[in-house]
Image (cartoon, rainbow, N blue to C red):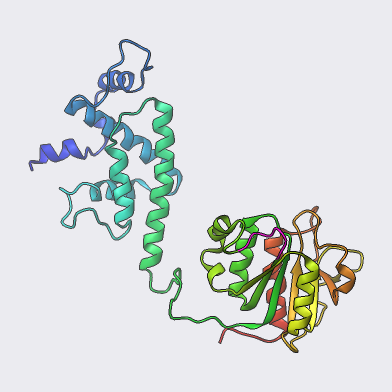
């Protein structure tokens, strides 16, 4: 391909290669109202396609600059998106194939932009996607970054269980499953309408659990009384409730029991908390100290705080 042909495909600077008059005319053709009889359907000629390429390139450049992608990197990305300018089609070690493919797709849309606003929105969305894909590519390429699960690694578990008393949010429950897997929880017990794997809310739960719901054993009970009976019969020597009450102790000042099957930690509903009928039967109630205006943390945030405090007391490490 001749150098002039290459320049038409990948102009060095769209604003410099077009006169101000051509820009004004093309802007009118690109973004005129569909109801305007003088509007021209874009994409009918090679010149129109070049103008669309230029305009979308400028919009995407602006959005990527906001995300920290400088002009030099943008030019590098644009060159990588053109198979005529590189020996290895569609690849650059800084961005990766997925980001380059996204860039190329944006510059060469199947349909013209219906308005300037829609083009700007698409540019912003695409810039965010390119930034994410390129960061993911570099993270996976870095040998020192552990950003994927090791399928050879087996779970290490401790004498520790979580009890979820009528939680309503599947996102919260999924997050708790992930924390439970990380902290080596032996099992999770769900009660009532709490979303659970292979049950109510399982699809939404899986979005935040990211597979942890498949590796942490779980049981379900219709009510909290049945769950308490199960815990005692299974040999849990300590059942701890997490709740903000006048009798609650700071979670760091309680000695958690490892005897038998160990300690079970109960978390209550996001609004009403733990069932008050069951509190007299708990061995103790703990709370996380609050220093802000709100009374408590989100239930999914509470779980790992207490779980890792228990492991700290038991002197478990990651060796």
- Residue shown at the point (42%, 33%) measured from the top left: 120
Q: Residue furthest top?
A: 37
- Residue furthest out toward the right: 246
Whether residue 214 sits left or right of residue 223 in the image: it is left
The residue depicted at 88 percent of the width and 64 percent of the height is 277
Quadrant for the N terminus, please. top left
Q: Position of residue 70 (x, y in %)?
A: 38, 48
Residue 247 lies left or right of residue 89; in this view the side is: right
Residue 106: in sight, yes or no?
A: yes
Residue 129 pos. (x, y %): 41, 48
Q: Can residue 251 be spotted in the picture?
A: no
Instruction: Return the residue nearer the eye: 241 or 302.
Output: 241
Lateral position of residue 255 relative to residue 152, left or right: right
Image quadrant holding the C terminus, namely bottom right
Magenta includes 215? Answer: no
x, y percent for residue 280:
90, 71
Query: Of helix, strand and loop, which mostly describes the magenta segment?
Result: loop
Outermost residue on the left side: it is 2
Reply above or below: 275 against 66. Answer: below
Q: Residue at x 77, y 65 (%)?
A: 223
- For the record, the magenta segment spans 191-196
x, y percentage for residue 79?
23, 48
The residue that appears at 81% across and 52% down in the rendered structure is 293
């Amino acid at each position: 391909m001749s150098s002039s042909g290459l320049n038409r495909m990948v102009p060095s600077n769209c604003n410099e290669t077009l006169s101000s008059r051509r820009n004004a005319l093309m802007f009118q053709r690109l973004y005129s109202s569909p109801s305007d009889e003088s509007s021209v359907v874009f994409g009918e000629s090679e010149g129109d396609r070049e103008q669309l390429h230029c305009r979308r390139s400028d919009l995407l450049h602006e959005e990527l600059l906001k995300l920290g992608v400088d002009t030099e990197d943008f030019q590098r990305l644009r060159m990588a998106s053109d198979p005529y300018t590189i020996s290895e089609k569609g690849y650059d070690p800084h961005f990766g194939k997925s980001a380059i493919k996204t860039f190329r797709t944006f510059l060469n849309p199947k349909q013209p932009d219906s308005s300037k606003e829609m083009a700007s929105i698409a540019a912003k969305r695409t810039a965010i996607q390119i930034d994410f894909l390129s960061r993911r590519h570099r993270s996976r390429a870095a040998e020192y970054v552990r950003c994927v699960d090791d399928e050879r690694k087996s779970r290490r578990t401790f004498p520790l269980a979580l009890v979820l008393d009528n939680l309503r949010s599947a996102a919260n429950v999924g997050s708790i499953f992930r924390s439970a897997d990380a902290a080596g929880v032996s099992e999770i017990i769900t009660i009532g309408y709490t979303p659970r794997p292979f049950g109510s809310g399982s699809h939404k739960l899986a979005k935040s659990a990211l597979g942890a719901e498949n590796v942490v054993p779980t049981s379900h009970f219709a009510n909290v009384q049945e769950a308490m009976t199960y815990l005692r019969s299974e040999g849990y020597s300590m059942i701890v409730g997490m709740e903000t009450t006048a009798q609650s102790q700071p979670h760091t000042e309680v000695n958690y029991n490892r005897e038998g099957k160990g300690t079970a930690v109960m978390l209550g509903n996001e609004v009403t908390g733990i069932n008050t009928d069951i509190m007299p039967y708990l061995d103790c109630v703990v709370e996380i100290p609050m220093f802000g205006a709100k009374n408590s943390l989100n239930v999914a945030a509470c779980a790992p705080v207490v779980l890792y405090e228990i492991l700290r007391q038991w002197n478990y490490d990651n060796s």
